[in-house]
Amino acid sequence: MTTLIERASLPLTSPLLIAALLFSTSACSNPATVNTSNNVPEQKESQTSKADMRTSDAQVSADKPEFTTKAVATFDEPWAMTALPSIDGKAPKLLVTQKTGELFIVDTATGRKTQVKGVPKVAYGGQGGLGDIRLAPDFATSNAVYISYAESGKGGDSNKFGAKVIKATLSGLDTNAPTLQAITPIWEQSPKVTGQGHYSHRLLFSPDGQYLYISSGERQKKEPAQDTSMNLGKIIRLYADGSVPKDNPFVSDDNNIASQFWTMGNRNVLGMTFDDGGRLWAHEMGPRGGDEFNLIEKGNNYGWPEVSNGRNYSGTPIPDHDTKPKYTAPKISWTPVISPSAISLYAAGDHNDFPNWQGNALISGLSSKALIVVGLNDDNTADERYRYDMGERVRSVLAVDGQVWVLEDGEGGQLLKLMPQ
């Protein structure tokens, strides 16, 4: 099993292998093994055939939106994207990161890519490299962005790694040579550890722009998720300048690390979003089975590695959430896994391409090669509404002003716009 990528994509070559994968429902070693719509191996589809969008019988609905896809640009190992403010109703420009360390401005009207210089050196390898990017709440006046990436330690710790978050000014935005300037450190994982998996390092601002949330993976070490002396396996809440709010649930004069925590017991959170009511939702990759969709609430402990609806990669069991109710159980648990990689809340603006998705969470899937639409209910429950077979591993999804873009994973990953039918 390869533990340095979220879930490797392996071909299915025999009925025996298919049966074994169905039994194991591995979240890491067994990726997009089985098409959850019809229990047959997923095949790489052409751009045209993606429009078919297969789905399970349980998800077939007369009001299910259908779409085709339009290729906008191509990347090598893209990881995250966010939209720059729209000007005069023109097609948005996106900021897109590549895990290998490149940042691009993409004109979605033309597909033109302009590389942004000044990105710090990243520790590329495994799941590590350049990560997430978010506009500062005051971007309109400051041109500030927040960026996460993996960095290596210094000296004798050069074989150890951790995520880092910086703030920078995006200068020359409308030129052919944009750059990052005035780079300021905001936060980093502590301690740096060996291995290059489960950085998480997703970024999200609260709706009022006051707080910065950072997902910090447990780096495939398990125990740090329950250790208050480490900020691994947690969701972090800070002010935009990196300082700690005094109302954080674990604030302590004796433990500056724990003061950063909003929640504990998180494994590998690669997607966070606020809904229209201000609730914070996040998805989390499980181990061998048991991907999670959680309502994130102040001070809660989500149980990893003490509980999970999956199993260890060795096949040994992990107690389910319902055996230890002191830990917060997920609102949705997926086995077979979907390998959730990003999330975006759909809201209509000048466009309303998919009105039936209004207020829903859009989740991109790696091993599932899917776009998953999840309904967020008033009673704090959630349910999967639709699933679309995209034919390729999907690294990211972004809803902007009622339109939707997705990023395919890996080398040659395409930026696609969803075109409603």
Image (cartoon, rainbow, N blue to C red):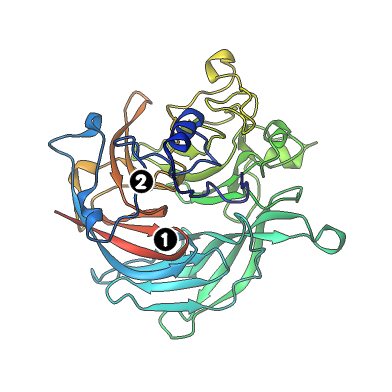
Residue 27 percent coordinates (x, y): 52, 38
Viewer-nearest residue: 145 or 52:
52
Can residue 296 be spotted in the picture? Answer: no
Viewer-nearest residue: 114 or 240:
114
Viewer-nearest residue: 407 or 235:
407
Measured along the vertical axis of the image, is residue 145 above or below residue 243?
below
Q: Is residue 154 left or right of residue 382?
A: right
Measured along the vertical axis of the image, is residue 53 above or below residue 375?
below
Circle 2 Cα neighbour tier, 10 Å, few/some/many (<14 / 14–19 / ≥20) = many
**Residue type at mark 2?**
Glu
Q: Residue at x 72, y 33 (%)?
A: 223
Residue 357 percent coordinates (x, y): 24, 43
Residue 285 percent coordinates (x, y): 52, 39
Residue 258 percent coordinates (x, y): 71, 37
Q: What residue did someone put label 2 on? A: 42
The picture quadrant where one finds residue 321 is top right
Circle 1 Cα neighbour tier, 10 Å, few/some/many (<14 / 14–19 / ≥20) = many
Using the numbered discs, state the Cα–Cα distance from disc 1 to disc 2 in whole angstroms. 29 Å
Q: Nearer the viewer, mark 1 or mark 2?
A: 2
Q: Residue at x 64, y 29 (%)?
A: 305
Identify the mark at residue 82; answer none if there is no mark.
Answer: 1
Can residue 251 be spotted in the picture? Answer: yes
